[in-house]
Amino acid sequence: MSDKPFPWRTLLFISVAFNLIVVGAVAGAYGAGVRVQRDAPEAAVTRMPGARAFIVAMPSETTRAAMRSKLADSWVESRTARSTASQARREAFDAAAAEPYDVERVRAAFARLREADQAAIGVIHDDVVEAFGQLTPAERRAAIDALRRARPARRAALAPAGDLAGEEAAPVRERWQERREEIRERRRERRERRQQQ
């Protein structure tokens, strides 16, 4: 046998250095904005920026107002598609929670959910396509560059509101309601001040 002890310190140093390199690479990639993108076409719904990003990306105030109007119209137009998607989401989660677990039933429910989500977002995308058609090539490039830098839209919650535990759901709704009331009150006060001037 060898008289040299096992090089624990050397192994520990190598392990710590390797872990620091991995953590640094992950943190650097995250900080640089690297996003993992899936090849599935339905993933485009979750990667697309939200409506506010489309409005902000417009180059001038007049085009922003036109985009705001188009998106408001498409929001109204897509109401039935959005409610269908919401119902499909509930059905998919109910199918996944049902016992005995039926793989084909759950797979079909999630397929219907993807189709419903695509239909709901399709209405908005059609209006965005029309709005892009009214821009000059330079304005369109600037808007698309802004949208590429925008964060993906966030879904408030995948589960229906009733699925949250009773104690958790009520305070969240109450806080949002209180916040909305505060904002409405501030707006009323500003309007009254402007009218008095």
Image: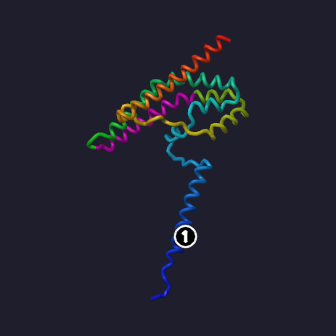
Q: Residue at x 71, y 32 (%)?
A: 139
Using the rendered view, name the quadrant where residue 172 is placed.
Answer: top left
Q: Is residue 116 left or right of residue 35?
A: left
Is residue 98 inside the magenta stretch? no
In the depicted structure, whether residue 29 falls above or below residue 119: below
**Residue at 58% across / 53% down in the picture?**
27
User: Which one is in front, 159 or 103?
Assistant: 159
Count of numbered circles in the view? 1
Q: Residue at x 43, y 36 (%)?
A: 158
Seen in the picture, residue 123 relative to 148 is either above or below; the reply is above
**Mark 1, secondary structure of its residue:** helix
* The magenta segment: 101-126
| Left-right relation of 141 to 69 | right
Does the magenta run of residues contain 124?
yes
Main secondary structure of the magenta stretch: helix
Amino acid of disc 1: Ile
Quarter holding the N terminus is bottom left
**Residue annotated with mark 1:** 14
Color encoding of the figure = rainbow
**Residue found at the far top of this picture:** 196
